[in-house]
Amino acid sequence: MFIQPYLFFDGRCDEAIEFYRQALKAEVVMLMRYGESPEGGEQCQGGATPPADKVMHACLQIGQTQVMMSDGFCSGKPEFKGVSLSLTVADDAQARRVFDALADGGQVQQPLIATFFASSFGMVADRLGVSWMVVTASADAP
């Protein structure tokens, strides 16, 4: 079994892709726009056709993980409630760089600090509203 995050950005997917390329050095594995779907393809709620230039499906490689994303079905402002993506990094310097990049234009929920379970741990909601936990496991952490 395999679980893979799939995020819906409701019209801001291109912005998200560029942000994660810069902040997390993400690589675009695939990108398909609604205009590339066959006739009679996806429709928004209420039967409207999504704009052809919007992202129907994309896949980003972030480290060892693939994150799927889309503009979704035209429902408005994206909401990411009750979920957070946990990003484990190699060292404290990388934790600081990634945390600061995600925090740019976002909201720090827990500043990056040393804890009993990690040499660096912090929580941030990025500028798109996605919550992240950045962690560097300490050598003596369980």
Image (cartoon, rainbow, N blue to C red):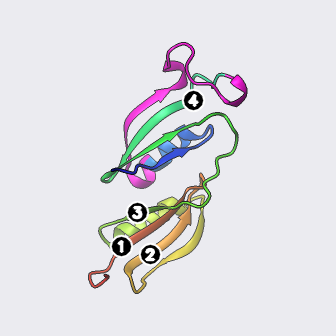
The residue indicated by pointer 3 is: 87
Q: Earlier in the sequence, mark 1 or mark 3?
A: 3
Which badge, 3 or 2, is on the more N-terminal residue?
3
Q: Earlier in the sequence, mark 4 or mark 3?
A: 4
In screen coordinates, is 130 left or right of 25?
right
Label 3: element kind: strand
| Comes first in the chain, label 4 or label 2 | 4
| Residue 44 lies in the magenta-colored region | yes
Identify the residue position indicated by label 1 in the image.
136
Q: Could you classify mark 4 by the number of other residues whose Cα lies within 10 Å: few (under 14), some (14-19), or many (20 or more)?
A: many
Q: State the separation of the CA atoms marked 1 and 2.
A: 7 Å
Q: Looking at the picture, tell me which residue is in the foreground, 36 or 2.
A: 2
The furthest residue to the right: 46
Q: Secondary structure at mark 4?
A: loop
Circles 1 and 2, Cβ within 8 Å, touching? The answer is yes
Q: Which mark is residue 54?
A: 4
Q: Position of residue 55 (x, y in %)?
A: 53, 32
Q: Residue at x 66, y 34 (%)?
A: 74
As drawn, 116 above or below 60: below
**Residue type highlighted by circle 4:** Lys
**How far apart in space, not on screen, are marks 4 and 2 (Cα)?**
35 Å
Provide the residue designation for mark 2: 121
